[in-house]
Image: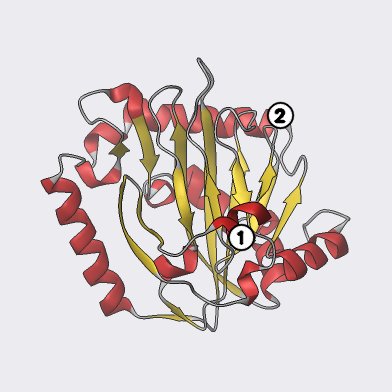
Amino acid sequence: MNIPANKKVIKESFTRDGYAVIRGFLNRAQVENASQQVSHFIDNVLSQLDASEAMFEDRENPETLKQIPNLSAHSPFFQEMLSSDRFVDLAELLLDGQVAPVGIQWFDKAPGASQATPAHQDGFFFMLQPNEAVTMWLALDDVDDANGCLRYVPGSHRTGLRNHGRTDVVGFSQAITDYDTNDREREVAIHAEPGDLLVHHSLTIHTAGANTSSNRHRRALQMVYYAEHAKQDKEQYQAYEELLKNELVENGKL
């Protein structure tokens, strides 16, 4: 398999905690290449697409570009990355079987122009039965508490899907409604360097702070893989996507 040599440790961490951290999954040259491909896409492709293909903290300010939700759908480079053995083999290890690649997103928390990411479970948005999927989060910048590192609640993938409710945070329309002190006390902050890969189960609770640094971005690529036997309620999913798009348009976010 085309995955790191410490695959046993990775698998054990993922099974026990609902997440695992793989240091140096990509080398610096590979990270730089991916970052350049993102920049090329933003400069040369994004403006030709529908407004829904980009999310901003403030649409009047291009510097606040926050999310490109369907990057791999419009980029051969990122579509190839998504389906590459290096990532697919890892997903299959973590989910104990064949997987279906879903897509790659790009995220940024710009300095001084970002909101905190509310506590949530990706599985709420996936709408799968059974809810078995893995999200891979690849750091493109140095990430720590100051610029909004990810925070996981260990073991939360074993307690099912929590109740979620509407938020006003762009890109994270739903958050856990009963997230409490006990959850916060269990959070584990994960610092990362460019090329580090964080992987988590679709039911693992996670959150992230705002970028409070003065001049440091927090850019990342996010890849999603569903277990091949997991089936999505497509009608419900499409209805939710349409509702969300309409709300973003009404609020001037699209």
Q: Quadrant of residue 157?
A: bottom right
In the image: residue 48, left or right of residue 103: left
* Rendered-image quadrant of the C terminus: top left
Q: Position of residue 6 (x, y in %)?
A: 88, 56
Q: SS of the residue at dot 2?
A: helix
In the image: residue 29, left or right of residue 78: right
Amino acid of disc 2: Arg
User: What residue sits right under mark 1 in the picture?
Assistant: 182
Q: Position of residue 64 (x, y in %)?
A: 34, 27
Q: Earlier in the sequence, mark 2 or mark 1?
A: 2
Q: Residue at x 28, y 77 (%)?
A: 236
* Rendered-image quadrant of the N terminus: bottom right
User: Is 28 situated above or below 226?
Assistant: above
Q: Residue at x 46, y 22 (%)?
A: 111
Residue 43 in view: yes
Nearest to viewer (mark 2 / mark 1): 1
Q: Residues within 10 Å of mark 2 (few under 14, many from 20)?
A: some
Residue with the most extreme top position: 215
